[in-house]
Image (cartoon, rainbow, N blue to C red):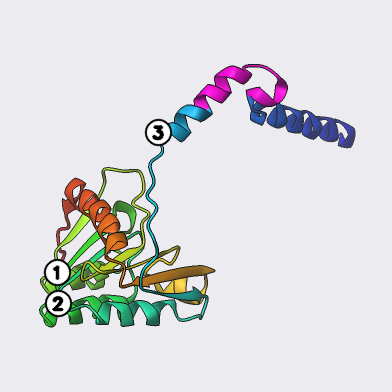
Amino acid sequence: MKHMLVRAIGAGLALVIAASTPAWASGHGHSESARAISSVLERSESSTLAAQGTVEVAFSPNGGCTAATVRFIGEARKSVRLAAYGLTSNPIGKALVDAKRRGVDVRVVVDKEHDGRRGGNNGIANFLGANGIPVRVDSAVRIQHNKVVIVDGQSVQNGSFNFTSAAQTSNAENITIHRGFPELARLFGDNWNHLWAESQDYRTEY
C-alpha cells in the first residue's frame, strides 16, 4: 500500500509539472507564446513622472500605518477620495467623519465583499453614511483591491495596507504617502473617478 501511494504521488507530481510547464519551455508553440506575451506587454499602459514633494513610509504589524493614515486624512482641507478593499478600522472611519465635519468633501469606494456590512449597524460604511459621507460599492470588477487615499488633489497614499485593525496588528503591510505631488494625485484621481463611476451607492443599514 505504501509503495502504491508513493507511485500515485509521483505520478500526480509529474502531471502537475507537465500541466504547468509553458509551451515555450518544452519547445512547442514558442512563436505563439512569444506573440501572446508581446501582445500583453504592448497593451499595458503606465505613466512615468518626475518625482516631486516628500515621501513618508510606514509598515505593519505595529509600525504606525493606521496612525500615519489618520494624520494624512487630518491634513485634508478640501477633499478626500478613498478606495478601500477592507474598511473596518474605527480610527480611520473617525478620521473620515472628522474631515467631513471640517467641511471637507469626503467620498469612499469599497469592494463588494468588504463593503462595511461587517459589524451590521455598527459597520464603518454605515457610520460614514450616517454622517453624510457618500459611499459606493464596486461590483463591476472581481475585486476592488485598491488601498488609496487622495487628499486635496495634491497628495496620495497607497500601498498594501488595508484600512483594518488586522492589517495594523497582524499583517505585514506597507504604505507610502506622497505629499505635494499633484501630477501623481491627478493620475490616481482619474482612476478613482473611474471606480466611482462604475460603482453603486451603498445603502446604509440601521
Compared across the picture, whether 100 is left or right of 56 comes to: left
Q: Is residue 21 above or below residue 158?
A: above
- Say what secondary structure mark 2 lies in: helix
Where does label 2 land, which residue? 100
Q: Which mark is residue 49?
A: none
Q: Is residue 31 magenta?
A: yes
Query: Dot 1: within a 10 Å radius of its alpha carbon, few (fewer than 14), some, or many (20 or more) residues?
Result: many
- Say what secondary structure mark 3 lies in: helix
Compared across the picture, whether 9 is left or right of 135 comes to: right
| Residue 16 drawn at (x, y percent) | 69, 31
Give the magenta range. 23-36
Q: Earlier in the sequence, mark 2 or mark 1?
A: 2
Query: Dot 2: within a 10 Å radius of its alpha carbon, few (fewer than 14), some, or many (20 or more) residues?
Result: many
Name the residue type under label 1: Ile
Quarter in which the N terminus is drawn: top right
Q: Is residue 159 magenta?
A: no
Q: Is residue 91 above or below residue 191?
A: below
Q: From this viewpoint, is residue 75 visible?
A: yes
**What is the CA distance from the residue labelled 2 to the residue labelled 1?**
7 Å
Question: Camera-side residue: 160 or 137?
Answer: 160
Image quadrant in which you'd find residue 108: bottom left
Name the residue type under label 2: Lys
Q: Are marks 2 and 1 in contact (CB under 8 Å)?
A: yes
The residue that appears at 25% across and 55% down in the rendered structure is 192
**What is the CA distance from the residue labelled 3 to the residue labelled 1?**
36 Å
| Residue 154 drawn at (x, y percent) | 25, 69
The residue that appears at 32% across and 82% down in the rendered structure is 71
Q: Which mark is residue 133?
A: 1
Q: Which mark is residue 43?
A: 3
